[in-house]
Image (cartoon, rainbow, N blue to C red):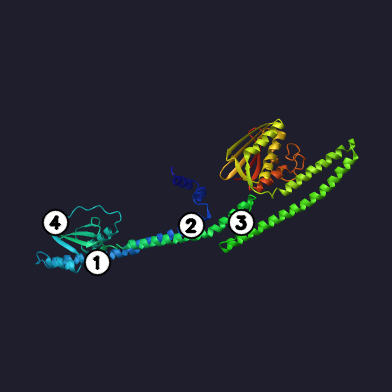
Amino acid sequence: MTTFETFKRDIERAPAAGWKRLGRWLRRQLPTGLYARSLLIIIIPMVLLQSVVAFVFMERHWQLVTQRLSTAVTRDIAAIIDLIDTYPQDANYTEIIRIARERLELNVAIEPGTELPAPRTKPFFNILDEILSEEIVRQIRRPFWIDTVGESNLVEIRILLDNKILRVYARRNQAYASNTHIFLLWMVGTSLVLITISILFLRGQIRPILALAQAAESFGKGQKMPEDFAPRGADEVRRAGLAFILMRERIERQMEQRTAMLTGVSHDLRTILTRFKLQLALAGDNPDLQGLHKDVADMQTMLEGYLSFARGDVEEEVGQLRLSDLFEKFAMEAELHERAFSSEIDGDDDVMVRPNAFSRLVGNLVSNSMRYAKTVHVEARHRAKWLTITVDDDGPGIPERSRDDVFKPFFRLDEARNLDASGTGLGLAIARDIARSHGGNVTLSDSPMGGLRATIRIPA
Protein backbone atom coordinates (compact mmCIF):
# COMPACT_ATOMS: atom_id res chain seq x y z
CA MET A 1 0.00 0.00 0.00
CA THR A 2 1.40 3.38 -1.01
CA THR A 3 1.84 6.33 1.34
CA PHE A 4 -1.01 8.20 -0.35
CA GLU A 5 -3.35 5.24 0.03
CA THR A 6 -2.42 4.98 3.70
CA PHE A 7 -3.22 8.65 4.26
CA LYS A 8 -6.50 8.25 2.35
CA ARG A 9 -7.49 5.31 4.53
CA ASP A 10 -6.61 7.19 7.73
CA ILE A 11 -8.58 10.27 6.61
CA GLU A 12 -11.64 8.13 5.89
CA ARG A 13 -11.42 6.43 9.30
CA ALA A 14 -10.52 9.47 11.43
CA PRO A 15 -10.56 12.73 9.42
CA ALA A 16 -8.89 14.96 12.03
CA ALA A 17 -6.06 12.55 12.87
CA GLY A 18 -5.58 11.65 9.19
CA TRP A 19 -5.20 15.27 8.11
CA LYS A 20 -2.76 15.93 10.96
CA ARG A 21 -0.68 12.94 9.91
CA LEU A 22 -0.71 14.11 6.30
CA GLY A 23 0.37 17.59 7.42
CA ARG A 24 3.26 16.16 9.45
CA TRP A 25 4.36 14.05 6.47
CA LEU A 26 4.31 17.11 4.19
CA ARG A 27 6.36 19.11 6.70
CA ARG A 28 8.96 16.33 6.76
CA GLN A 29 9.18 16.37 2.96
CA LEU A 30 9.70 20.12 2.73
CA PRO A 31 13.24 21.50 3.02
CA THR A 32 14.25 22.90 6.40
CA GLY A 33 16.76 25.52 5.23
CA LEU A 34 15.76 29.17 4.86
CA TYR A 35 17.40 29.38 1.42
CA ALA A 36 15.45 26.42 0.01
CA ARG A 37 12.19 27.57 1.58
CA SER A 38 12.64 31.09 0.19
CA LEU A 39 13.13 29.62 -3.29
CA LEU A 40 9.95 27.59 -2.88
CA ILE A 41 8.06 30.74 -1.86
CA ILE A 42 9.13 32.32 -5.15
CA ILE A 43 8.96 29.33 -7.47
CA ILE A 44 5.65 27.78 -6.39
CA PRO A 45 3.51 30.93 -6.95
CA MET A 46 5.28 31.53 -10.25
CA VAL A 47 4.59 27.98 -11.43
CA LEU A 48 0.95 28.16 -10.30
CA LEU A 49 0.42 31.53 -11.99
CA GLN A 50 1.94 30.43 -15.27
CA SER A 51 0.06 27.15 -15.15
CA VAL A 52 -3.23 29.06 -14.81
CA VAL A 53 -2.22 31.45 -17.61
CA ALA A 54 -1.22 28.56 -19.85
CA PHE A 55 -4.45 26.71 -19.13
CA VAL A 56 -6.58 29.75 -19.89
CA PHE A 57 -4.59 30.41 -23.05
CA MET A 58 -4.87 26.83 -24.24
CA GLU A 59 -8.52 26.57 -23.32
CA ARG A 60 -9.66 29.91 -24.70
CA HIS A 61 -7.29 31.63 -27.06
CA TRP A 62 -5.70 28.60 -28.71
CA GLN A 63 -8.99 26.79 -29.12
CA LEU A 64 -10.76 29.92 -30.36
CA VAL A 65 -8.10 30.69 -32.96
CA THR A 66 -8.03 27.09 -34.15
CA GLN A 67 -11.81 27.03 -34.43
CA ARG A 68 -11.89 30.20 -36.51
CA LEU A 69 -9.15 28.96 -38.83
CA SER A 70 -10.85 25.57 -39.24
CA THR A 71 -14.15 27.34 -39.94
CA ALA A 72 -12.52 29.38 -42.71
CA VAL A 73 -10.90 26.31 -44.31
CA THR A 74 -14.17 24.38 -44.13
CA ARG A 75 -16.02 27.32 -45.69
CA ASP A 76 -13.55 27.36 -48.59
CA ILE A 77 -14.03 23.61 -49.11
CA ALA A 78 -17.81 24.09 -49.06
CA ALA A 79 -17.44 26.81 -51.72
CA ILE A 80 -15.42 24.42 -53.92
CA ILE A 81 -18.13 21.77 -53.58
CA ASP A 82 -20.75 24.35 -54.58
CA LEU A 83 -18.67 25.22 -57.67
CA ILE A 84 -18.44 21.56 -58.59
CA ASP A 85 -22.21 21.14 -58.27
CA THR A 86 -22.99 24.42 -60.04
CA TYR A 87 -20.68 24.00 -63.06
CA PRO A 88 -20.78 20.33 -64.07
CA GLN A 89 -19.80 21.27 -67.64
CA ASP A 90 -16.17 21.60 -66.53
CA ALA A 91 -15.44 17.91 -66.93
CA ASN A 92 -11.78 18.09 -65.82
CA TYR A 93 -12.49 20.70 -63.15
CA THR A 94 -9.46 22.63 -64.38
CA GLU A 95 -10.76 26.07 -63.50
CA ILE A 96 -12.03 24.96 -60.10
CA ILE A 97 -8.63 23.45 -59.24
CA ARG A 98 -6.90 26.66 -60.41
CA ILE A 99 -9.18 28.91 -58.37
CA ALA A 100 -8.69 26.75 -55.28
CA ARG A 101 -4.92 26.82 -55.66
CA GLU A 102 -4.49 30.50 -56.55
CA ARG A 103 -7.27 32.15 -54.54
CA LEU A 104 -7.83 29.81 -51.61
CA GLU A 105 -4.31 28.29 -51.29
CA LEU A 106 -5.78 24.78 -51.34
CA ASN A 107 -4.54 21.88 -53.46
CA VAL A 108 -7.56 19.89 -54.60
CA ALA A 109 -8.10 16.82 -56.72
CA ILE A 110 -11.36 15.18 -57.90
CA GLU A 111 -11.08 11.44 -58.20
CA PRO A 112 -13.66 8.83 -59.14
CA GLY A 113 -14.79 6.53 -56.35
CA THR A 114 -17.50 5.95 -53.81
CA GLU A 115 -15.60 4.69 -50.75
CA LEU A 116 -13.54 6.54 -48.20
CA PRO A 117 -10.55 5.03 -46.35
CA ALA A 118 -11.07 3.53 -42.94
CA PRO A 119 -10.95 6.09 -40.09
CA ARG A 120 -7.48 6.67 -38.74
CA THR A 121 -6.53 6.50 -35.07
CA LYS A 122 -7.25 9.75 -33.29
CA PRO A 123 -4.12 11.62 -32.21
CA PHE A 124 -3.44 12.05 -28.48
CA PHE A 125 -3.60 15.83 -28.72
CA ASN A 126 -6.58 16.08 -31.07
CA ILE A 127 -7.84 19.64 -30.79
CA LEU A 128 -7.48 20.17 -34.56
CA ASP A 129 -9.04 16.82 -35.37
CA GLU A 130 -12.11 17.50 -33.23
CA ILE A 131 -12.71 21.09 -34.28
CA LEU A 132 -12.19 20.44 -38.01
CA SER A 133 -14.49 17.41 -37.88
CA GLU A 134 -17.20 19.44 -36.16
CA GLU A 135 -16.99 22.19 -38.76
CA ILE A 136 -17.18 19.74 -41.70
CA VAL A 137 -20.24 18.10 -40.17
CA ARG A 138 -21.88 21.47 -39.54
CA GLN A 139 -21.13 23.15 -42.91
CA ILE A 140 -20.74 20.39 -45.53
CA ARG A 141 -22.88 17.58 -44.14
CA ARG A 142 -21.36 14.88 -46.33
CA PRO A 143 -19.31 11.79 -45.51
CA PHE A 144 -15.68 12.72 -44.99
CA TRP A 145 -12.28 11.45 -43.93
CA ILE A 146 -9.46 13.56 -42.51
CA ASP A 147 -5.81 12.97 -41.70
CA THR A 148 -4.18 15.45 -39.32
CA VAL A 149 -1.28 13.19 -38.38
CA GLY A 150 0.37 11.86 -41.54
CA GLU A 151 2.17 14.85 -43.03
CA SER A 152 3.30 17.26 -40.37
CA ASN A 153 2.82 20.38 -42.51
CA LEU A 154 -0.36 19.34 -44.35
CA VAL A 155 -3.90 18.35 -43.47
CA GLU A 156 -5.66 15.98 -45.89
CA ILE A 157 -9.45 16.10 -46.19
CA ARG A 158 -11.55 13.77 -48.36
CA ILE A 159 -15.21 14.51 -49.04
CA LEU A 160 -17.51 11.90 -50.66
CA LEU A 161 -19.60 13.48 -53.42
CA ASP A 162 -22.17 11.66 -55.62
CA ASN A 163 -19.82 9.41 -57.56
CA LYS A 164 -16.45 10.96 -56.87
CA ILE A 165 -14.17 11.96 -54.02
CA LEU A 166 -12.83 15.46 -53.44
CA ARG A 167 -9.34 15.43 -51.98
CA VAL A 168 -8.15 18.67 -50.39
CA TYR A 169 -4.65 19.39 -49.06
CA ALA A 170 -4.37 22.43 -46.81
CA ARG A 171 -1.41 23.74 -44.90
CA ARG A 172 -1.67 22.97 -41.18
CA ASN A 173 -1.30 26.61 -40.16
CA GLN A 174 -4.40 27.44 -42.27
CA ALA A 175 -6.57 25.40 -39.90
CA TYR A 176 -4.54 25.34 -36.71
CA ALA A 177 -2.84 27.91 -34.45
CA SER A 178 0.58 26.36 -34.94
CA ASN A 179 2.65 29.24 -33.49
CA THR A 180 1.45 28.69 -29.94
CA HIS A 181 4.75 27.11 -28.92
CA ILE A 182 6.34 30.56 -29.20
CA PHE A 183 4.18 31.72 -26.29
CA LEU A 184 5.17 28.68 -24.25
CA LEU A 185 8.85 29.18 -25.01
CA TRP A 186 8.65 32.83 -23.96
CA MET A 187 6.83 31.85 -20.78
CA VAL A 188 9.34 29.16 -19.81
CA GLY A 189 12.30 31.32 -20.81
CA THR A 190 11.20 34.30 -18.73
CA SER A 191 10.52 31.97 -15.80
CA LEU A 192 14.05 30.61 -15.94
CA VAL A 193 15.48 34.12 -16.08
CA LEU A 194 13.39 35.23 -13.10
CA ILE A 195 14.34 32.13 -11.10
CA THR A 196 18.03 32.72 -11.83
CA ILE A 197 17.76 36.32 -10.67
CA SER A 198 15.90 35.18 -7.55
CA ILE A 199 18.58 32.61 -6.72
CA LEU A 200 21.37 35.19 -7.04
CA PHE A 201 19.42 37.73 -4.99
CA LEU A 202 18.48 35.24 -2.27
CA ARG A 203 22.05 34.01 -1.93
CA GLY A 204 23.11 37.55 -1.14
CA GLN A 205 20.31 37.94 1.39
CA ILE A 206 20.82 34.56 3.09
CA ARG A 207 24.60 34.90 3.46
CA PRO A 208 24.42 37.49 6.33
CA ILE A 209 21.89 35.29 8.16
CA LEU A 210 24.22 32.29 7.86
CA ALA A 211 27.11 34.40 9.16
CA LEU A 212 24.98 35.49 12.13
CA ALA A 213 24.01 31.88 12.84
CA GLN A 214 27.68 30.81 12.69
CA ALA A 215 28.68 33.61 15.08
CA ALA A 216 25.89 32.66 17.51
CA GLU A 217 26.90 29.00 17.32
CA SER A 218 30.54 29.87 18.03
CA PHE A 219 29.46 31.96 21.00
CA GLY A 220 27.31 29.10 22.28
CA LYS A 221 30.35 26.80 22.11
CA GLY A 222 32.48 29.32 23.98
CA GLN A 223 34.61 30.06 20.92
CA LYS A 224 35.69 33.42 19.55
CA MET A 225 33.43 35.24 17.15
CA PRO A 226 34.68 35.18 13.51
CA GLU A 227 36.97 38.13 12.93
CA ASP A 228 35.26 39.17 9.69
CA PHE A 229 31.75 39.14 11.21
CA ALA A 230 29.87 42.41 10.80
CA PRO A 231 26.15 43.21 10.46
CA ARG A 232 25.25 43.05 6.76
CA GLY A 233 22.21 42.53 4.59
CA ALA A 234 18.72 43.90 5.05
CA ASP A 235 17.86 46.31 7.86
CA GLU A 236 16.22 43.58 9.93
CA VAL A 237 19.25 41.31 9.61
CA ARG A 238 21.57 44.20 10.46
CA ARG A 239 19.55 44.98 13.57
CA ALA A 240 19.65 41.32 14.61
CA GLY A 241 23.44 41.19 14.07
CA LEU A 242 23.99 44.40 16.01
CA ALA A 243 21.75 43.17 18.83
CA PHE A 244 23.77 39.93 18.96
CA ILE A 245 27.08 41.82 19.16
CA LEU A 246 25.75 44.06 21.96
CA MET A 247 24.37 41.04 23.80
CA ARG A 248 27.70 39.24 23.59
CA GLU A 249 29.57 42.31 24.81
CA ARG A 250 27.22 42.66 27.77
CA ILE A 251 27.62 38.98 28.68
CA GLU A 252 31.40 39.12 28.38
CA ARG A 253 31.51 42.34 30.39
CA GLN A 254 29.34 40.78 33.08
CA MET A 255 31.57 37.69 33.19
CA GLU A 256 34.68 39.86 33.46
CA GLN A 257 33.13 41.89 36.27
CA ARG A 258 32.13 38.72 38.10
CA THR A 259 35.60 37.26 37.70
CA ALA A 260 37.23 40.49 38.89
CA MET A 261 34.91 40.66 41.89
CA LEU A 262 35.55 37.05 42.82
CA THR A 263 39.29 37.57 42.42
CA GLY A 264 39.10 40.37 44.97
CA VAL A 265 36.97 38.30 47.30
CA SER A 266 39.38 35.39 46.88
CA HIS A 267 42.33 37.63 47.77
CA ASP A 268 40.62 38.90 50.92
CA LEU A 269 39.46 35.49 52.09
CA ARG A 270 42.79 33.88 51.37
CA THR A 271 44.50 36.60 53.41
CA ILE A 272 42.26 35.76 56.36
CA LEU A 273 42.83 32.02 55.91
CA THR A 274 46.57 32.63 55.79
CA ARG A 275 46.34 34.43 59.11
CA PHE A 276 44.39 31.51 60.57
CA LYS A 277 47.03 29.07 59.31
CA LEU A 278 49.85 31.25 60.70
CA GLN A 279 48.20 31.51 64.12
CA LEU A 280 47.58 27.76 64.16
CA ALA A 281 51.21 27.14 63.23
CA LEU A 282 52.40 29.39 66.05
CA ALA A 283 50.10 27.57 68.48
CA GLY A 284 52.05 24.35 67.97
CA ASP A 285 50.86 20.78 67.92
CA ASN A 286 47.93 21.15 70.22
CA PRO A 287 45.47 18.22 70.00
CA ASP A 288 42.64 20.58 70.86
CA LEU A 289 43.29 22.50 67.62
CA GLN A 290 42.96 19.53 65.25
CA GLY A 291 39.31 20.35 64.56
CA LEU A 292 40.24 23.95 63.75
CA HIS A 293 42.93 22.75 61.35
CA LYS A 294 40.35 20.62 59.55
CA ASP A 295 37.86 23.53 59.37
CA VAL A 296 40.51 25.80 57.83
CA ALA A 297 41.36 23.15 55.23
CA ASP A 298 37.67 22.69 54.41
CA MET A 299 37.24 26.45 54.05
CA GLN A 300 40.20 26.54 51.65
CA THR A 301 38.72 23.72 49.56
CA MET A 302 35.23 25.28 49.56
CA LEU A 303 36.66 28.65 48.53
CA GLU A 304 38.47 27.08 45.56
CA GLY A 305 35.27 25.26 44.59
CA TYR A 306 33.19 28.42 44.68
CA LEU A 307 35.72 30.31 42.58
CA SER A 308 35.98 27.50 40.04
CA PHE A 309 32.22 27.34 39.68
CA ALA A 310 31.83 31.11 39.24
CA ARG A 311 34.84 31.44 36.95
CA GLY A 312 33.88 28.50 34.75
CA ASP A 313 37.24 28.58 32.93
CA VAL A 314 35.83 31.09 30.42
CA GLU A 315 39.23 32.62 29.81
CA GLU A 316 40.63 29.45 28.22
CA GLU A 317 41.04 29.29 24.45
CA VAL A 318 39.72 26.48 22.29
CA GLY A 319 42.34 23.93 21.33
CA GLN A 320 42.88 20.30 20.37
CA LEU A 321 42.58 17.52 22.93
CA ARG A 322 43.45 13.86 22.39
CA LEU A 323 40.91 11.63 24.08
CA SER A 324 43.24 8.63 24.29
CA ASP A 325 45.75 10.64 26.34
CA LEU A 326 42.98 11.82 28.67
CA PHE A 327 41.65 8.30 29.18
CA GLU A 328 45.17 7.02 29.83
CA LYS A 329 45.44 9.43 32.76
CA PHE A 330 42.16 8.08 34.12
CA ALA A 331 43.50 4.54 33.81
CA MET A 332 46.57 5.47 35.85
CA GLU A 333 44.37 7.12 38.47
CA ALA A 334 42.16 4.01 38.62
CA GLU A 335 45.23 1.84 39.15
CA LEU A 336 46.30 4.00 42.08
CA HIS A 337 42.87 3.71 43.65
CA GLU A 338 42.63 0.00 42.86
CA ARG A 339 39.63 0.41 40.58
CA ALA A 340 38.80 -1.43 37.35
CA PHE A 341 38.80 1.03 34.44
CA SER A 342 38.12 0.52 30.71
CA SER A 343 37.61 2.93 27.83
CA GLU A 344 36.51 2.87 24.20
CA ILE A 345 36.77 5.49 21.44
CA ASP A 346 34.55 5.32 18.36
CA GLY A 347 35.54 7.93 15.79
CA ASP A 348 38.27 10.57 15.62
CA ASP A 349 40.57 10.66 18.63
CA ASP A 350 41.19 14.42 18.46
CA VAL A 351 38.49 16.90 19.52
CA MET A 352 38.33 20.72 19.48
CA VAL A 353 37.42 21.88 23.00
CA ARG A 354 38.81 24.01 25.82
CA PRO A 355 41.31 21.37 26.94
CA ASN A 356 41.66 22.15 30.65
CA ALA A 357 37.96 22.77 31.21
CA PHE A 358 36.92 19.69 29.25
CA SER A 359 39.48 17.53 31.04
CA ARG A 360 38.09 18.77 34.34
CA LEU A 361 34.53 18.03 33.18
CA VAL A 362 35.28 14.41 32.30
CA GLY A 363 37.69 14.06 35.20
CA ASN A 364 35.08 15.11 37.75
CA LEU A 365 32.63 12.51 36.49
CA VAL A 366 35.24 9.74 36.29
CA SER A 367 36.69 10.56 39.73
CA ASN A 368 33.22 10.55 41.23
CA SER A 369 32.56 7.11 39.74
CA MET A 370 35.86 5.81 41.08
CA ARG A 371 35.02 7.16 44.51
CA TYR A 372 31.72 5.31 44.76
CA ALA A 373 32.15 2.32 42.41
CA LYS A 374 34.65 -0.45 41.82
CA THR A 375 34.28 -0.66 38.02
CA VAL A 376 34.16 2.29 35.63
CA HIS A 377 33.74 2.24 31.85
CA VAL A 378 34.11 5.33 29.63
CA GLU A 379 32.97 5.34 26.00
CA ALA A 380 33.41 8.19 23.50
CA ARG A 381 31.56 8.45 20.20
CA HIS A 382 32.87 11.17 17.90
CA ARG A 383 30.55 11.83 14.97
CA ALA A 384 30.38 14.58 12.36
CA LYS A 385 28.11 16.81 14.45
CA TRP A 386 28.26 15.56 18.05
CA LEU A 387 30.76 14.22 20.58
CA THR A 388 29.13 11.92 23.14
CA ILE A 389 30.98 10.56 26.19
CA THR A 390 29.28 8.16 28.62
CA VAL A 391 30.67 7.28 32.05
CA ASP A 392 29.18 4.06 33.48
CA ASP A 393 29.83 2.54 36.90
CA ASP A 394 28.49 -0.11 39.25
CA GLY A 395 28.11 2.20 42.26
CA PRO A 396 25.01 3.14 44.29
CA GLY A 397 23.79 5.67 41.71
CA ILE A 398 21.49 8.64 42.29
CA PRO A 399 17.70 8.33 42.76
CA GLU A 400 15.75 9.34 39.69
CA ARG A 401 13.74 11.94 41.61
CA SER A 402 16.96 13.78 42.53
CA ARG A 403 18.76 13.75 39.17
CA ASP A 404 17.53 17.20 38.21
CA ASP A 405 18.15 18.70 41.64
CA VAL A 406 21.79 17.61 41.85
CA PHE A 407 22.66 20.03 39.03
CA LYS A 408 21.55 22.98 41.16
CA PRO A 409 24.38 24.83 42.92
CA PHE A 410 24.85 23.99 46.61
CA PHE A 411 22.42 21.07 46.48
CA ARG A 412 23.69 18.28 48.72
CA LEU A 413 22.69 14.66 48.32
CA ASP A 414 23.28 13.14 51.73
CA GLU A 415 21.83 9.70 51.17
CA ALA A 416 23.79 8.85 48.00
CA ARG A 417 26.78 10.27 46.21
CA ASN A 418 28.03 13.81 45.63
CA LEU A 419 30.58 15.01 43.12
CA ASP A 420 32.21 17.61 45.38
CA ALA A 421 34.54 16.08 47.92
CA SER A 422 34.16 19.01 50.34
CA GLY A 423 30.39 18.70 50.40
CA THR A 424 29.64 22.11 48.88
CA GLY A 425 27.20 20.68 46.34
CA LEU A 426 28.97 22.24 43.34
CA GLY A 427 30.39 19.18 41.59
CA LEU A 428 27.61 18.47 39.10
CA ALA A 429 26.85 22.17 38.76
CA ILE A 430 30.43 22.80 37.68
CA ALA A 431 30.32 19.84 35.27
CA ARG A 432 27.12 21.03 33.61
CA ASP A 433 28.40 24.61 33.50
CA ILE A 434 31.50 23.49 31.58
CA ALA A 435 29.44 21.31 29.24
CA ARG A 436 27.00 24.14 28.49
CA SER A 437 29.87 26.55 27.88
CA HIS A 438 30.83 24.15 25.07
CA GLY A 439 27.26 24.26 23.70
CA GLY A 440 26.27 20.86 25.12
CA ASN A 441 24.89 19.32 28.30
CA VAL A 442 25.35 16.63 30.95
CA THR A 443 22.56 14.20 31.81
CA LEU A 444 22.21 11.35 34.29
CA SER A 445 20.49 8.01 33.85
CA ASP A 446 20.65 4.37 34.92
CA SER A 447 23.75 2.49 33.84
CA PRO A 448 23.66 -0.99 32.27
CA MET A 449 26.33 -1.85 34.85
CA GLY A 450 23.84 -1.25 37.67
CA GLY A 451 25.05 2.15 38.85
CA LEU A 452 24.95 5.65 37.38
CA ARG A 453 25.47 6.71 33.79
CA ALA A 454 26.65 10.28 33.13
CA THR A 455 26.34 11.36 29.50
CA ILE A 456 28.25 14.31 28.06
CA ARG A 457 27.00 15.53 24.67
CA ILE A 458 28.58 18.56 23.00
CA PRO A 459 28.83 19.75 19.37
CA ALA A 460 31.83 18.28 17.60
User: What x and y, as percent, mark residue 204?
Assistant: 52, 60
Q: CA distance from mark 1 to mark 3?
A: 75 Å
Q: CA distance from mark 2 to mark 4?
A: 64 Å
Pick the residue in front: 238 or 131: 238
The amino acid type of the residue labelled 1 equals Ala
Residue 379 drawn above or below residue 168: above
Q: Seen from this angle, which residue lies furthest bottom? A: 103
The amino acid type of the residue labelled 2 equals Leu
Q: CA distance from mark 4 to mark 3?
A: 92 Å
Residues tagged 2 and 1 counted as in contact (Cβ below 8 A): no
Q: Earlier in the sequence, mark 1 or mark 3?
A: 1
- As drawn, the label of residue 227 is 3
Q: Nearer the viewer, mark 2 or mark 4?
A: 2
Q: Earlier in the sequence, mark 2 or mark 4?
A: 2
Q: Secondary structure beneath disc 1?
A: helix
The amino acid type of the residue labelled 4 equals Thr
Q: Secondary structure beneath disc 3?
A: loop
Give the left or right position of residue 74, taking residue 403 as reference.
Answer: left
Q: Secondary structure beneath disc 4?
A: loop
The amino acid type of the residue labelled 3 equals Glu
Which image quadrant is residue 187 in? bottom left
Q: CA distance from mark 3 to mark 2?
A: 30 Å
- Residue at which label 4 appears: 114
Q: Secondary structure beneath disc 2?
A: helix
Q: Nearer the viewer, mark 2 or mark 1?
A: 2
The quarter of the image holding the C terminus is: top right
- Residue at which label 1 appears: 72
